[in-house]
Image (cartoon, rainbow, N blue to C red):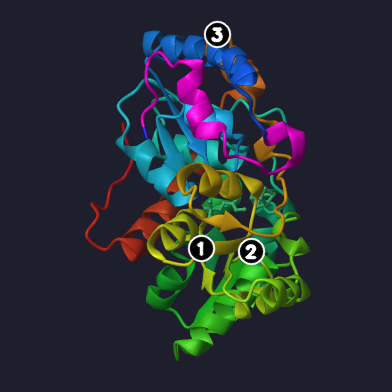
Amino acid sequence: MTSASVMTPQQLYEKLKNVRVGGHVCQYSLKKCEELVLLINEINRLKKEKDAVILVHSYVSPELVYGIADFVGDSYKLSRDAIKTKAKTIIFVAVRFMGETAKIVNPGKEVLVPAREAGCTLADAIKAEDVRRLKKEFPGYTFVCYVNTSAEVKAECEVCVTSANVYQVVERIPSDKIYFLPDKFMGQNLKNEMAKRGVKKDIQYFSGTCYVHEEYTAEQIFKVRTEYPDVRIVSHPECNAEVVANSDFVGGTEQMLDYMRKTKAKQFLMLTECGLSSRLQSEFPDKELVGSCSLCKYMKSNTLEDVLRVLQNPSAHERIEIAEDVRVRALKSLEAMFKYAEPGMPKKVVCE
Ligand code: 13P
Ligand code: SF4
């Protein structure tokens, strides 16, 4: 998705008029769009002047997704987009660990994260010293980290995964002892999926959770299915095992959108952050969203004002810096992920 250089309020309104999730923060009138395009057009002008590219995760507010993004997607797609870009500066409108991933593959570029609260309950659940301790407790295990981890944690692990490739990558790792971190629900789902595929691996996992996805329950699914018998339940692998077992489709956020694009069903319950529901309403207006969604306060702490500010004058905490020895070791876990996820991809992914 490429943002046009000058956007009219009507063009923005066409994208946002069907968005009805998350209460008043995510509802748009033509009048509101008139105000928003002033900021949007200034950001789009400045990013050209400064040779910057804007990467936006689908969870952030829709005016950022449809107003200023050069690339939109999940953490896997955006990490691939970060490798491809030739721009001098990357503005990563998401959370800190995603900006760090872009910096790991782009040491020569400036990477800026404008979020006021750039954390993530998963990435914040584990530190490098925890991994070093666990490695002593679990000798002989291959340490696999979810991409929702800091660069320091990635540097301690052998292979990184995202929600889009966790099953495929772990199946292909030539080791029958896996320690997965930090998400306990994804760890349990991984264990169940490997058993379903007949893959014999001893899988241990850490105790972290995503505070958004841990709220969903199988009871919510049963209730919605009674009311809407044809509904498709679409969930993220950060949900618990019972939710996953009772879903029609489970995948990363980009795969969830792809499933909805391809399936003929009309009604969906999305068990993930509201940003995905907004994209469904904007891009598939003939499909109906049932039930509710939850907001990630970290992703939603990105605003147009913040993006403009970092383009004009970034402060130190918005600039991603990673010690070179940590970056080099973290890169190895990302390269291992690309090797198992896309065997044909060139071995070196770093952009000098
Ligand atoms: P995706 O990679 O599926 O977009 O997930 C990122 C995330 O933070 C989910 O909560
Ligand atoms: Fe982290 Fe959960 Fe927010 Fe995703 S939704 S960024 S896992 S806190």
Expressed as whole percent of the image width and height from the top left, the position of residue 187 reads 62, 72
User: Residue 84 appears in which quarter of the rendering?
Assistant: top left
Q: Which residue is mark 3?
A: 312
Amino acid of disc 2:
Glu
* Discs 3, 2 touching: Cβ within 8 Å: no
Q: Is mark 2 within 8 Å of ligand 1?
A: yes
Amino acid of disc 3:
Gln
Q: Which residue is mark 1?
A: 266
Label 1 Cα crowd, 10 Å radius (few <14 / some 14-19 / many 20+): some
Q: Residue at (67%, 33%) from the top-left corner?
A: 27
Expressed as whole percent of the image width and height from the top left, the position of residue 292 reads 72, 55
Q: Which mark is residue 238?
A: 2
Front label number (3 vs 1): 1
Tag 2 secondary structure: loop
> Would residue 314 be visible to someone looking at this image?
no
Image height check: is 48 above or below 278?
above
Q: Is residue 17 magenta?
A: yes
Amino acid of disc 1:
Lys
Q: Residue at (53%, 26%) from the top-left corner?
A: 13
* Residue 152 as seen in the image, left or right of residue 347: right
Numbered range of the magenta stretch: 2-26
User: Residue 36 appears in which quarter of the rendering?
Assistant: top right
Q: Residue at (58%, 9%) from the top-left corner?
A: 313
Q: Is mark 3 within 8 Å of ligand 2?
A: no
Q: Is residue 267 magenta?
A: no
Sequence-first tag of 2 and 1? 2
